[in-house]
Amino acid sequence: MSRIGLLGGSFNPAHGGHRRISLFALEALGLDEIWWLVSPGNPLKPKKGMAPLAARVSSAMVQARRAPIRVTAIERELGTRYTVDTLAAIKRRFKRHDFLWLMGSDNLAQFHLWRDWRGIANAMPIAVIARPGYDGDAVASPAMAWLRRFSVPLSSFRHRGEWSAPALVTLRFDPDPRSATAIRRADPDWASRHAGFSLRDQVTHRPIPSEGETTAP
Ligand SMILES: Nc1ncnc2c1ncn2[C@@H]1O[C@H](COP(=O)(O)OP(=O)(O)OP(=O)(O)O)[C@@H](O)[C@H]1O
Ligand SMILES: O=C(O)c1ccc[n+]([C@@H]2O[C@H](COP(=O)([O-])O)[C@@H](O)[C@H]2O)c1
């Protein structure tokens, strides 16, 4: 069984913060790989200001270089938009991997607005990464009122033989202030540098392995 952390996001664009939290989570949780699921469209975010999926995937590939991170546009392939549907489809397809959902604390603060968020928590463990400015809202969030009872300290989660869900692990480390919003403000034309990239030929910088194949980098 390989242990995979899934980081879903708009990646509009991907930035060093994504890479850093992914590598930190990989190490802290003892994962084999992180898969970035570049979303064709977050159901809660406006389309306006969202760069084309190909440009966002291309920016993610740059940030994922030489790291055990696979960049995917798998929701496009699966035809899913809601995370609960994506996770069910991924679990059906990769029966011999264990999955964990990773998100920043800004997403936990809004998690109760996601479709069937309890279904997501029932599908796989969740690890939340502290993010400057959002941790207070996350702790006080409606989702946390329910999820709190499933909290597991990192040390015991790491040493668990089998993963079960619901389980909530909070990852605290030197917080990373980077955000895509700040990058878009400073560099509104970032997507033009990725205009030549096409999703037709390749959607992962390293193909997702088929069942049974080792995922070790
Ligand atoms: N600096 C960070 N610290 C912790 N989590 C982060 C950080 N940056 C992004 N994330 C998490 O990575 C995932 C994907 O993030 P996303 O692509 O929306 O980037 P973002 O910087 O939050 O974008 P935006 O500013 O446009 O909202 C989310 O779960 C988000 O919480
Ligand atoms: O399923 C939902 O209802 C839902 C609502 C909001 C966000 N999401 C997912 O949350 C992930 C983070 O999105 P973002 O835009 O904050 O980077 C991404 O995978 C989205 O598809 C999912």
Image (cartoon, rainbow, N blue to C red):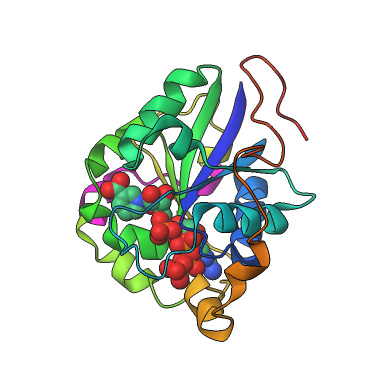
Q: Nearer the viewer, residue 79 or 209?
A: 79
Q: Is residue 170 left or right of residue 192?
A: left
Q: Nearer the viewer, residue 59 or 175?
A: 59
- Percent position of residue 11, x then y: 52, 59
Our reading of the magenta stretch's main secondary structure is: helix
Q: Is residue 69 left or right of residue 162?
A: right
* Res. 107 image quadrant: bottom left
- Percent position of residue 37, x then y: 51, 45
- Percent position of residue 77, x then y: 47, 32
Q: Is residue 150 magenta?
A: yes
Q: Is residue 49 above or below residue 166?
A: below
Q: Is residue 33 above or below residue 18?
A: above
Furthest residue toward top? 212
Q: Is residue 200 magenta?
A: no
* Residue positioned 34% across, 62% down in the render: 47
Locate the C terminus and report the quarter of the image it occupies: top right
- Percent position of residue 66, x then y: 80, 49
* Residue positioned 51% across, 24% down in the render: 162
First to last magenta residue range: 143-155
Q: Is residue 108 above or below residue 5?
A: below
Locate the N terminus and report the quarter of the image it occupies: top right
Furthest residue toward front? 196
Q: Nearer the viewer, residue 90 or 56?
A: 56
